[in-house]
Image: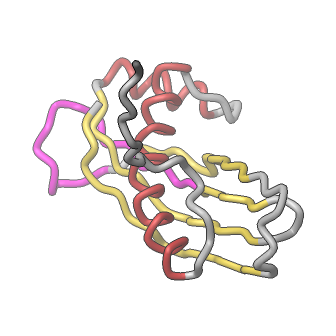
Amino acid sequence: MKLIGFSLTKADLEKKSDNFKDLKISTGIDISDLKEVESDMFSSKDEILAVKFQYTINYEKDIAFLKFYGNVILSVDSKQAREALNEWKEKKLPEEFRLAVFNTIFRKASIKALQIEEEFNLPPHIPLPTFKSLEKKK
C-alpha cells in the first residue's frame, strides 16, 4: 500500500475553557467512505482507493474539541483492494488495511493538530519528547 495523497477538506475547533485541571484527551478516527477511483493520472497496475475520514481530538470535561475531515488516496494491490471494497459493503475493513489507513491518518493529522493546538494554547494531544537532566549517582 502506497500513499498517493492526503488532503483535509474541513477543520472544526472550539475551545470553551482554559481550565485544564484533570484533563483527559481522547482521539478517534472514523471512516465514512471507501471507494475505488478511476483515473488516467495514475499509471499503476495497483488499484486506487479513496478513503474519506474524520479525525477527532476531544479535550474531555467539555474543554475543547478539534475535528478534521479529509481524504486519503492510496495505491493498493488488486487483491487487497477487492477484499477492502467487499468488506466495506458491510462497513467493515480488513484489519491490516484498517491499521495502515488509521496510522496514515493519525500521523498526517496529528502534525496539523499540534500546530493548531499551539496556536490556540491547548495542550498537545500526544506526549512530546522532552529533555531531562542526567544526575550522577554516587
Q: Quadrant of the N terminus?
A: top left
Residue 92 appears in which quarter of the rendering? Answer: top right
Instruction: Tell me, yes or no, whether the highlighted magenta stretch contains residue 121.
Output: no
Residue 12 appears in which quarter of the rendering? Answer: bottom right
Instruction: Tell me, yes or no, whether the highlighted magenta stretch contains residue 43.
Output: yes
Residue 86: x percent and y percent?
A: 55, 26
Q: Tell me: 8 left or right of 92.
A: left
Span colored in magenta: 38-53
Residue 56: x percent and y percent?
A: 66, 58
Q: What residue is drawn where x is 56% and y is 54%? A: 53
Q: Return the residue nearer the eye: 138 or 3.
A: 138
Q: What residue is drawn where x is 62% and y is 47%? A: 29
Total tally of numbered discs in the picture: 0
Q: Return the residue nearer the eye: 28 or 70.
A: 28
Q: What residue is drawn where x is 89% and y is 62%? A: 61
Q: Return the residue nearer the eye: 58 or 43.
A: 58
Residue 59: x percent and y percent?
A: 75, 62
Q: Quadrant of the C terminus?
A: top left
Looking at the image, the residue that sits furthest to the left is: 43
Q: Is residue 68 above or below residue 116?
A: above
Q: What residue is drawn where x is 48% and y is 46%? A: 106
**Visual colour scheme:** secondary structure
Residue 88 appears in which quarter of the rendering? Answer: top right
Q: Tell me: 66 left or right of 4.
A: right
Residue 45: x percent and y percent?
A: 16, 31
Q: Return the residue nearer the eye: 136 or 21.
A: 136
